[in-house]
Amino acid sequence: MSRITDVMKALDAQGKKALIPYITGGDPRPEWTVELMHTLVQAGADIIELGVPFSDPMADGPVIQLACERALEHNTSLDDIFSMVKEFRETDKATPVVLMGYLNPLEVRGYERFAQEAAESGADGALIVDLPPEEAESLVPFLKQNNLDAIFLIAPTTTKQRVKFICDQSSGYVYYVSVKGVTGSATLNVGEVAEKVAQIKAHNQIPVGVGFGISNAKSAAEVSKVGDGVIVGSVIVNLIAKNQDDKTSMNSEVKALVSSMRKAMDA
């Protein structure tokens, strides 16, 4: 059983939901990322999605696009991401880390090598945004061999038949994209999210993490009532951008935001 599954089961037993913040590795500076990851855990994060910076992050809006640009200005590479996870693991053996990114860096590296190095670094899963499960048969076996969860996306427009297929191919959790559009682009409709999560649960009991459109403690609390996990990205990355020249202020503001979400979710 994976570290992600362990965490999800432990939270379920406590009647709690997973708080899953996203940050882009290397943003605003590579040497700040590990401390920021620890800050997220101190604030109440259960799982961390660590973005692998990419030059054309097509599913992301301007906020995370700019985060990738800031990271790439420092030449943050996949090797650097692995090093960050290794350093994080030196003092945190428990918090799952999901590598989230795009296919090109994996194609260059090779799927088998990527999976081996991801596992060796201490990562727990991979979410490759532009790799649909129908085309993932070259990657998923290597992830499984290295005890890494394969996490796939479900959209509001995904058909019931395809929802079942995606759930069957996924492990750890599935990522439900709660709005039509890119990250940070739209207002959340919790009623519609509840309906879709119920449809997903009808096919498979895999945990459902809900992301896109969650911007404050109130929306995090509302989503936690219908999903198994609350995934938060753009609002955190906005704070990083705002404080990109002041590490202390950045960590303080991110911690305050994530803590407020954790408190609201647990209330």
Image: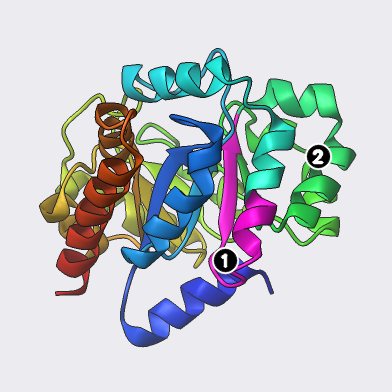
Total marks shown come to 2
Camera sees residue 166: yes
Q: Quadrant of residue 5?
A: bottom right
- As drawn, is 36 to the left or to the right of 166? left
Q: Residue at x 49, y 78 (%)?
A: 9
Query: Alpha-carbon distance for marks 2 and 1?
Result: 19 Å
Please report the bounds of the magenta region as a residue range.
85-101
154 in relation to 41, above or below: above
244 in relation to 200, above or below: above
Q: Which residue is mark 2?
A: 114
Q: Residue furthest bottom?
A: 13
Question: In the structure shown, which secondary structural element does the residue marked by tag 1 occupy?
Answer: helix
Question: In the structure shown, which secondary structural element does the residue marked by tag 2 occupy?
Answer: helix
Q: Kindly identify which numbered label has been placed on residue 194.
A: none
Counting other residues with Cα less than 10 Å from the Cα at mark 1, is it few (<14), some (14-19), or many (20 or more)?
many
Mark 2: which amino acid?
Answer: Phe
Locate residue 92, reporting x and y percent.
Answer: 57, 68
Label 2–label 1 contact, CB within 8 A: no
41 in relation to 13, above or below: above
Locate residue 11, reporting x and y percent.
Answer: 41, 78
Judge whether residue 232 is colored magenta: no
Q: Quadrant of residue 148?
A: bottom right
Q: Residue at x 76, y 29 (%)?
A: 106
Camera sees residue 58: no
- As drawn, is 221 to the left or to the right of 174? left
**Quadrant containing the N terminus in the rendered view:** bottom right
Q: Which residue is mark 1?
A: 4
Q: Residue at x 83, y 28 (%)?
A: 109
109 in relation to 118, above or below: above
Nearer to us in this view, 18 or 208: 18
Locate residue 211, reporting x and y percent.
Answer: 35, 44
**Quadrant containing the C terminus in the rendered view:** bottom left
